[in-house]
Image (cartoon, rainbow, N blue to C red):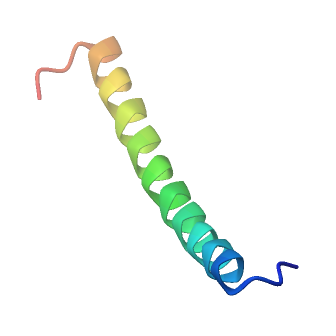
Amino acid sequence: MANIRSAIKRIRQNERRRVRNAAVRSTVRTGVKSVRAALESGAKD
């Protein structure tokens, strides 16, 4: 565990960002998957 206050804060910030990035990354991957599936099936929507 870090002893310097700025390092402790940075650890907290990185954890929050990691969780947020994982959620966004999951949403983007789902969207890409659905677009690729639509292109494969030839849908015009």
Q: Is residue 18 above or below residue 4?
A: above
Is 23 positioned to the left or the right of 38 in the image?
right
Query: Outermost residue, right direction?
Result: 1
Q: Which residue is found at the position 28% from the left and 24% from the top?
A: 38
Q: How many labels does the image show?
A: 0
Image quarter hosting the N terminus? bottom right
Q: Which residue is found at the position 83% from the left and 78% from the top?
A: 2
Is 4 positioned to the left or the right of 30 in the image?
right
Is 32 positioned to the left or the right of 44 in the image?
right
In terms of depth relative to the viewer, which is nearer, 10 or 15? 10
In terms of depth relative to the viewer, which is nearer, 31 or 8? 8
In terms of depth relative to the viewer, which is nearer, 32 or 43? 32
Residue 7 lies in quadrant: bottom right
Q: Which residue is found at the position 55% from the left and 56% from the top?
A: 22
Q: Which residue is found at the position 37% from the left and 24% from the top?
A: 37
Query: Outermost residue, front direction?
Result: 4
Across and down, in percent, residue 24 comes to 43, 55
Is 27 positioned to the left or the right of 35 in the image?
right
Q: Is residue 35 above or below residue 8?
A: above
Q: In this view, does 45 lie above or below 2?
A: above
Image quarter hosting the C terminus? top left
Q: In this view, does 37 lie above or below 29?
A: above
Residue 13 lies in quadrant: bottom right
In terms of depth relative to the viewer, which is nearer, 38 or 14? 14
Across and down, in percent, residue 5 comes to 68, 86
Across and down, in percent, residue 16 comes to 56, 73
